[in-house]
Image (spheres, rainbow, N blue to C red):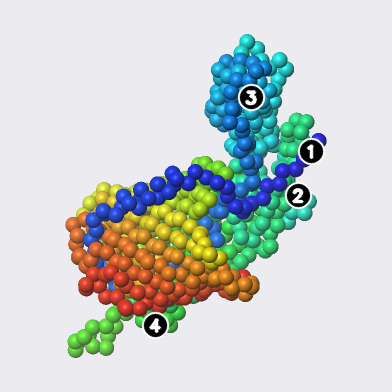
Amino acid sequence: MIFKINVRGRDKIGDFWWGILCLLYLQIMIGMLPFKVFAEMALPEMDLLEMDIAEPQIPNSIIPPLSHAQLASEPVLPENLYNDEVQCVAINNVELINLDAFPNAAHLKEKAEEAHGRCLGEQGLSVLVANLQQQLVVDGYITSRVVFVGDSERDGTLMLKLMPGKIEDIRHHQDSVGNAHLSALFPGKRGDLVNLRHLEQGLENLQRLTSVNATLDVELNREDLSSQIIVNRQQSRLWRINAYLDDAGHDAVGRYRTGLILSFDNPLSRYNPLSLSDLLYFSVNRDLDSQPDKGHNSYGVHYSVPYGNWLFSMTGNQGERYQSFSFAGKRLAGKKFGYRSHWSVLDTQIQHLLTRGVNYKTVGYAGVLIRQSASFWTHREIDIQRFNTTDWQLGIEHLHYMPWATFRGGVRYQQGASWFGAQPIPGKMSTAPARLVDITSSLDIPFKIGTQSFQYRPAFSQQHTYSDISSLDKFTIGGRSSVRGFNENNALTGSRGWSLKNDISWISPIPGQTFVGQQFYIGMDYGEVSEQGQPFLLGERLAGAVVGTRGNYHAFGYDFNVGVPITKPAEFDADPLVFGFTLTWQY
C-alpha cells in the first residue's frame, strides 16, 4: 500500500514558545543603553574609503526563507494520562528496540521514561505509543513508526519497536523542468531515515533562486516504510536583470547613483545537465552627476552554490572614487588638484546549517575578507592611506518565526590576520591584530487596528571593540542606512557604537494589482558612537525621523521619503529637511 505526504515550501509557521526570544531581544537592547559614547569627527573629503557605495539588495539572502511542512498537531491527551487503571500491567521499564538508529534517541528515551513505575492499561499503553509517535513526527521522522512486539511485556519490562522509515530514492517528477542535482541539494541520501528537516533544507536549496519554484511528494510504502521522494521543479528563466537609481551618494563623489545587475540562475546548466542551484551575478555601479572633476564607479561579481547543509559564496568588488580641489591665492588660482582612490574587496564565506526546527533555523559561518586600497594626490600615492588587510570572520545567524513576529539576529567576530600579503595599517598605534564584534537583531511585528493592517519593525545594531581599528571598520551613524534624517555628507564615526531604527508601516488597503505592497511609513532612529581617547570630538549622538511611502508598480519598485534631524551636536552641519528616493526595476 502506498500513500502520499505532500510537502510544500514557503508556508506559514506554527506556534512557538515566544517568551525566550523576546527576553533575549530585550536583554540585548537594555544592556546597551548605558553605553557611554562620544564621536570622532569624520573627514569625508579625504577618507573616501569610508563612503560605502551601496548596491541594491541581491536576491541571495544569508538566511533564505524557511520551508515548512504542516506537521501533525500534538495529541490531546486525557488528564489521567498515566493514572492506574483497573486492568493494567505494572511497567518498571520501557525498552525501545532500534533506538540507536535514531539521532533523537534522547528525546524518545525521555518520553518512554514517563511510563516507568506506572500501571498501564489499554488506554495508558495507547497514550504512551502516541507520545512516542508524536515525538518522532516533531523531530522530523515523519515516516517512522512505533509498534508493539509479540509478548511485549516481560517481568515489568515493556518492549516497543521503532520501525525506521528510510529513503529509497530521491528523483524528479516527470513534469519537472530541468534536472537539478538532487543528491547534492538534499542532505539525506538513499538508506537514510526520512527526516522532514532534511526535506525542507533540500527544498530550500532548490528555491533559493527566485526563478525556481519546487514542491515534493513523499510516497510511502507501508509494507517496509520505504519512501520515494519525488521533486517537481519549475524554472521560469535562466537569467534576470535588476537596476536601481537613488540619491544616497556623497556630494563629494556624486550624489545620484545608478547600477545594473545581471544574474544567472544555474549558470552551469548549459554545460552540465544537472543543475546545482548555483547563482552567478555581475554588477556595475556609477554616479550620475556627470561632472568631470568628481565621481565614482565600481564593478562586482558573485558566485554561490549550496551542497546539502552547506553554502559556499564568493563576492569580489573593485572601483574608484575621485574628486578635484581648488585653492585660493595667486600662485594656485585657477588650478585644480585631483584626489583619487582605488579599492578592491574579496569576501569568501562557508556557511553551515547548525540546527533547524518547525519554525526556526540557525546557521554558522566562517569567512575571509581581503581589502586593498590606494589613494593618490595629483598622481602621487599617499602612503599613509594605503590599505592591504586580511580579516577572518566567524559568525552565527538565527531566524525564528513566532505567532506574533519574525525574529532575525546575528553575532559576528572579526580579527585581523597577516595572510595573503596583508600589511600593517599606516598610522596605527598598535601592531596587535584588530578584533571586533558586531551584533544585529530585528523584529517584524504585524498588527491590526480595526480592519487596517500595520507593521512595526525595530532593528538594532552594535559594534564593540577595544582594538585600534582602521577607518574601514569604524561604526558610522547618519544617513539612510543607519540614523535617518541626515544625508550622507556628514556622519559621526567611532570604533564602538550602536543604533536603533524603528519603522511603523501602514499597509495600504487599496485593492488591485497595479500597486503591490504599497506602504506608508514613519520612522524614528537613534545612534551613538565612541572612540578610545576621544580624539577629534564632534559629538556623541544623533537622532532623526523620516516619513515616506514605498511599494511596487508592475516591474518597478519605489521608495520616496523625507527626513528631519531631531538631536545632533551643536557644530554638526545638517539640513533641516532631507529628501530621498530609491527606484528599482527588475526583469
Contact, mark 2 vs mark 3 (Cβ under 8 Å): no
Do the numbered discs 2 and 1 sit on residues whose CB atoms are within 8 Å?
A: no
Residue receiving disc 3? 124
Can residue 482 be seen in this snapshot? yes
| Label annotation for residue 2 | 1
Whichever of labels 2 and 3 marks the residue nearer the N terminus, that label is 3
Between disc 4 and disc 2, the foreground one is: 2
Q: Which secondary structure lies at badge 1?
A: strand
Please give left or right for residue 250 compared with residue 511 in the image: left
Dot 3 lies on which element? helix
Query: In the image shown, does 167 or 89 lie closer to the viewer?
Result: 89
Q: Name the residue beneath numbered marker 2.
A: 173
Amino acid type of disc 3?
Gly
**Separation (CA) of disc 4 from disc 2:** 58 Å
Q: What is the residue that sits farthest to the top in this orientation?
A: 155
Determine whether the residue tagged by mark 4 lies in a helix, strand or loop: loop
Quote the CA–CA distance across marks 2 and 1. 17 Å
Q: Residue, x 40% and y 47% (percent of image)?
A: 23
Question: Of marks 1 and 3, which one's residue comes earlier in the chain?
Answer: 1
Q: Residue 6: image x %, image y %? A: 71, 46
Alpha carbon of mark 1 to alpha carbon of mark 3: how far?
Answer: 30 Å
Disc 3 packing (10 Å; few <14; some 14–19; many ≥20)? many
Q: In this image, 80 relative to 222: left or right?
A: left
* Amino acid carrying mark 1 in the image: Ile
Tally of marks: 4
Residue 126: % across, % down: 67, 27
Q: Which of marks 2 and 1 is nearer the N terminus?
A: 1
Give the residue pinned by disc 4.
Answer: 292
